[in-house]
Amino acid sequence: MIHFPKLDEDKNSINKLMSRTQVIEYFGISKSTLWRWSNVEKKLPFIQINRRKFFKMDDIEKLIEYNYSPNFT
């Protein structure tokens, strides 16, 4: 009998991936803005499989946290 170990949800789990379309809709940006963020400014790393690009949800959250500034006015 084969026993497979259980994966913790926090550790060793596969990160959720978002497609270009999902990221564009999530941020409300254009294709050219996403291209600039990922290729020119290197703000958002991507995974390329054939001609498709995917973005890790963790990287998207890091981008938001890095650019977050509380408004105290």
Image (tube, rainbow, N blue to C red):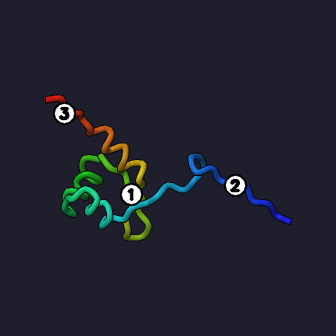
Q: Residue furthest right?
A: 1
x and y percentages locating residue 33 in the rendered image: 20, 56
Between 62 and 6, which is closer to the camera in this rendering?
A: 6
If the image is split into quadrants, where does the N terminus sit? bottom right
Q: CA distance from mark 3 to mark 2?
A: 43 Å
**First in residue order: circle 3 vs circle 2:** 2
Q: CA distance from mark 3 to mark 1?
A: 28 Å
- The local crowd at label 1, few if under 14, some if 14 to 19, many if 20 or more residues have their Cα within 10 Å, is many
Between 3 and 73, which is closer to the camera in this rendering?
A: 73
**First in residue order: circle 1 vs circle 2:** 2
Q: Secondary structure at mark 1?
A: strand
Q: Residue at x 31, y 38 (%)?
A: 66
Q: Residue at x 75, y 59 (%)?
A: 4
Q: Amino acid at mark 1?
A: Phe
Residue labelled with disc 1: 55
Instruction: State left or right for residue 71 relative to residue 2.
Output: left
**First in residue order: circle 3 vs circle 1:** 1
Instruction: State left or right for residue 15 relative to residue 7.
Output: left
x and y percentages locating residue 41 in the rendered image: 25, 47
Q: Residue furthest bottom?
A: 51
Label placed on residue 71: 3
Residue labelled with disc 2: 6
x and y percentages locating residue 25 in the rendered image: 26, 63
Q: Amino acid at mark 3?
A: Asn
**Is the Cβ of the residue at disc 1 closer than 8 Å to that at disc 2?**
no
- The local crowd at label 2, few if under 14, some if 14 to 19, many if 20 or more residues have their Cα within 10 Å, is few
